Amino acid sequence: MPQPKELDPYANPRTFYGAELRRLRETAGLSQNQLGERVFCSGTYIGLFEAAERRPQLELSRALDELLGSGEHLQRLCLLARKSNVAGYFADAAELQLQASFIGSCTSVVLGLLQTEAYARALTRSAHPFAAKEVIEGHVHTRMERACLLDSPTAPVLWMVIHEAALLVPVGGNAVMAEQLAYLAEQAASRPRVVTQVLPLSAGAHPVLQASMTLMQFTEAPAVVYTESAYSGQLVEEPLLVEQYRSAYDLARAAALSPEASLDRIVSAAKEFVTP
């Protein structure tokens, strides 16, 4: 469980939320475990909020306000702490990626952290065909900014299992796909902490065909899973369900081509999109 640590309550809205939650809990004479039991979560989870290591949740804040008799205080702070430049449903996962020591994904498109600008733009435009250009460019810019995570001295191990179908669909056209696959191959070959495996068509049915999933593991916190479709996402933290997703991810890695064979397949697919 995260131990209480001295935070500057005024550093940002999240630390202020954590400090206020801790103050209200201690005033009520409750331990983290006792408070967690009363709002149906773990004491570890309460500790993560108090340490400003997780973005606060509105529903939980409502329950905490009711239990601690704090009116709507924590709910208001929660709204401030949850402001983000990324889509609301992805904001929690984006924050957790910065803290993860390991990120494992199963996808049917190239993972956002490894997308080229043109590929990201084509995917975003396909999901929002009627959006204004500036809206599309805002999404693309934010996605490109997040890729700097891989350049951090504390970058996580990123292990992506990508379905072979993602190498065959011409997202954005042949030129965009050729560039994207060449970039993916270059990243896999040059970054020792980036591992890419291709799940071949011959592997047959697999959960990755139904929705993308990203497993995030941490040094001092329980693992979580993020699942996503074109218009929504969900953060999964229930241990038994996380374990089920972890098993699916492990099976995907076992069924996929080796990293070396996967790199060859990506390079081969890139050449197929190059116009003679």
Image (cartoon, rainbow, N blue to C red):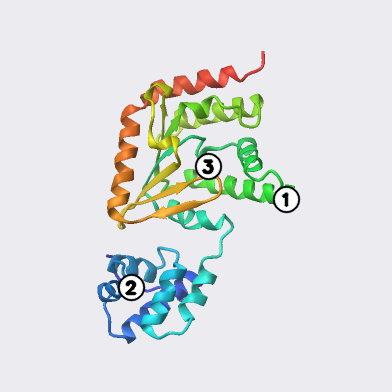
Left/right of residue 225 with respect to residue 146 in the rendered view: left
**Which residue shows up at 57% across the image and 27% down it?**
169
- Which kind of residue does numbered mark 2 sit on? Val
Q: Quadrant of residue 177?
A: top right
Nearest to viewer (mark 2 / mark 3): 2
Residue of label 1: 134
**Circle 1 — which element?**
helix
**Which residue shows up at 33% across the image and 73% down it?**
39
Instruction: Calculate the distance from the C-alpha at mark 1 to the C-alpha at mark 3.
Output: 19 Å
Residue of label 2: 39
The foreground one among 122 and 206 is: 206
Q: Residues within 10 Å of mark 1 (few under 14, many from 20)?
A: few
Instruction: Calculate the distance from the C-alpha at mark 2 to the C-alpha at mark 3.
Output: 34 Å
- The label shown at residue 172 is none
The foreground one among 186 and 139 is: 139
- The label shown at residue 112 is 3
Nearest to viewer (mark 2 / mark 1): 2
- Which kind of residue does numbered mark 1 sit on? Glu
- Which kind of residue does numbered mark 3 sit on? Gly
Q: Percent x, y for residue 28?
A: 31, 85
Q: Percent x, y for residue 223?
A: 33, 52
